[in-house]
Image (cartoon, grey):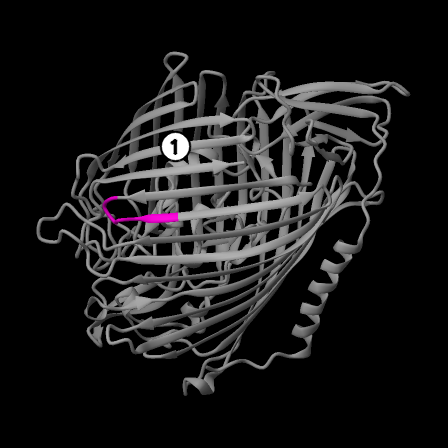
Amino acid sequence: MIHSFRPQSRILSRIAVVVCFLLFVTASPLLAASVVEITVTDTEGGAIPGAVVSLLGTGHEAVTDGEGVARFDAVAAGSYEVVVRLPGFLSNRSDIAVTEGTPVRVSVSLSEALHFSESVTVTPTGRDTFESYQPATVLGGEDLQQRLGATLGATLASEPGVNVRSFGAGNQRPVIRGLDNDRVLILENGTRTGDLSSQSADHGVNLDPATAGSIEVVRGPATLLYGSSAIGGVVNLVSEEITTKPVNDVHGSMTVQGATADENGGIAGDVSVGNGRLAVRFNGSAQRTSDYETPDENLETVPNSFSRSKSGGGAFSFTGQDGFAGASYQYVTSRYGVPFVEEGETTLNPRRHRLDFRGERRNLDSFIEGVKFQGAFRDYQHDEIEGSGEIATSFENQTWEGQIFLHHRPAGRLQGTFGVWLLDRDYSSAGEEALAPPTTQRSLAGFVYEELSFHHASLQFGARLDHTSFDPEGAAVDRDVPQRDFTEFSGSVGVLGYLREEHDLTLAVNLARAARNPSLEELYNLGPHAGNFAFEIGDATLPTEVGYGVDLSLRYRGSRFVAEGTGFLNRIDNFIFPFQTGEIEDDLAVVNFISADSELKGFEAHVDAGLTPDVWLIFGGDTVRGELRDGGDALPRIPPYRVWTGLRYEKNGFHLEGEVKNVGEQTRVYGAETPTDGYTVLNFHGSYQLTTGKTVHTFTVRLDNASDELYRNHLSYIKDLTPEIGRSLKAVYGLRF
């Protein structure tokens, strides 16, 4: 294995990460003297701990305690708008009047959310997705358990705007609005996973969705906060791995799942112990699937489509009303088969060590009223193993990542965040598919994100400047591979308007300029790549992609009707894609990475309408059209339209739902890509939630592809060789205490 030399500047950056963490640990919290008290309850009057309460325009923010009470320091006399937010509940806005010397005590009731929930990914400080400038989805709680799959891609495959790329069952990856690979960034609690799933179709995402508290998706350019690789969107797996709020006594969760068509079995759990100041958490998971069954009589099971995964780790954190500081360690290992490649016997065995540091301080008495810090180390490796047991290719990817958010005190109605992000990456490979040389990648960025808030509208604007350098070791591959440097600017402007006094109807418009530098693979790959069915030729002179996008979202939420519709247009200059030359090399199609101007446009929608107090009509769908602007040729691997309708019954903890999903044919294809027929599948699921004291049990049963329909996923690299999984019965049990 070849390793790059690490200069002193990189060592200093890592020391800075540790020093910042120690500052968070040793900092003592501010003492608070309450003048305003906000009590937060559910609709039945039960106290809700952990809700975030903000006084708009003051910068004051507090978290409700075990009795559901948030307390603030002395607040000057005047009128204020109070905003209460908590994932899984509708946010609440109310007005209060503060009189000098008179305590104010207000009670606020939160209702459970349907589709809209708090997202920590869409802005630096978190925001209700009903009020976000960009379209976003949060899948958590009972909804997450009902959608839970063996992989991250399978779990999100039915969300609006999200499809799944696959090369079997163990390597599925989300695709957002037709964009994939280095254009969709996968995060874990806000930091990069460090795996190589964006590099190749046979590389999987090294995450178990059963370990998530929620999974968040931002659809559309998100480079302002997350940099180059988020030009198409972001997926963030969120867990309370590092506890951010005071924990008393013992808390935990467990998920057990099993399914028939792939003989899936899995378990995941965590337990946290705390004394209100120090919290310690341990977690673990294990999952397996066998070769999955299909409705094809000629291929009843797909050989070598099995998967195995295990993970475990621990964390500690110091918590208080004004912040937290903590660290965690996790180890994840998996093994899965890659069907139909190299005689159908190839397996991959991803392993990943990860270390995280996170901290936050709020309510500081200075211009910088809040500071948030994230630091992460990832050591990822995987081998591609032939049927004989011989290792054909080995990959190693090490990353250090750090980020600081500085929240400044409001200046009138203006409030915002600015910060710095850095990434240090060492990549190397050895063996038959070592297509790129060992390369060191360094990135540094500065960004600013500001909001102007009014009673009936808000305005967001921001900018980001990224610098990225690639330093390859050309001698290792015996060819000339030049160093490349990229400096990129991204920016956005968003407007959110409340169209009714009740704040139940919003219109969001977001304009973005997003930039993406070419990936390491697009620049330097050269050689046969069986995992992409291609002989790849990179181009070290490729330019930066620059996208200009607009999203327009109309949202309504009421007690009996919830809906959202979003139209989008994204024009990307210098769009990089694998151009098929028509030549054959090593029995693989030769592709050159080239750039051309492109356009993607489409629409996403979902509607939930209450027919009776217990019965809901469900409707949703999405479509995207991607093409080259010169000539109108289709972009590679664009998903077809989807429409789904269903009925849902809910009462006293029971949830029953049936859904018919129609997927159109896809005949607009690129080059030698083959078209796919449309299909219709029928899905059912039911769940029951039982609460006993502070313990919540959730039982879920799901029947996927009930009619055993034979269909093919247009984004599957092996769709011409095998259909998708057949009828499958799945059961999931969830426990929270």
Q: Residue furthest top?
A: 612
Q: Was residue 264 drawn as part of the magenta stretch in this picture? A: yes
- Quadrant assignment for the C terminus: top right
Q: Amino acid at mark 1?
A: Phe
Q: How many marks?
A: 1
193 to 620, vertically: above or below = below
Q: Which residues are magenta?
A: 260-266
Residue on which the image places disc 1:
699
Disc 1 is placed on an element classified as strand
66 to 557, vertically: above or below = below
Q: Was residue 671 drawn as part of the magenta stretch in this picture? A: no
Please state which of residues 292 and 198 is positioned toward the viewer in this rendering: 292
Q: Residue furthest left?
A: 298
Instruction: Examine the rendering and report whether any part of residue 26 can be seen.
Output: yes
Whether residue 25 sits left or right of residue 443 in the image: it is right
Q: Main secondary structure of the magenta part?
A: loop
Asked which quadrant contains residue 288, the reply is bottom left
Please state which of residues 680 and 131 is positioned toward the viewer in this rendering: 680
Residue 411 position in % (x across, y down): 79, 37
Q: Residue at x 26, y 49 (%)?
A: 263
Q: Residues within 10 Å of mark 1 (few under 14, many from 20)?
A: some
Please state which of residues 529 and 733 is positioned toward the viewer in this rendering: 733
Residue 102 position in % (x across, y down): 87, 18
Residue 384 position in % (x across, y down): 33, 71
Residue 670 position in % (x across, y down): 26, 55
Whether residue 3 sits left or right of residue 589 in the image: it is right
513 to 607, vertically: above or below = below
Whether residue 452 sits left or right of residue 547 in the image: it is right
Asked which quadrant contains residue 87, the reply is top right
Q: Residue at x 53, y 69 (%)?
A: 398
Instruction: Examine the rendering and report whether any part of residue 567 can be seen.
Output: no
Q: Residue at x 21, y 53 (%)?
A: 719
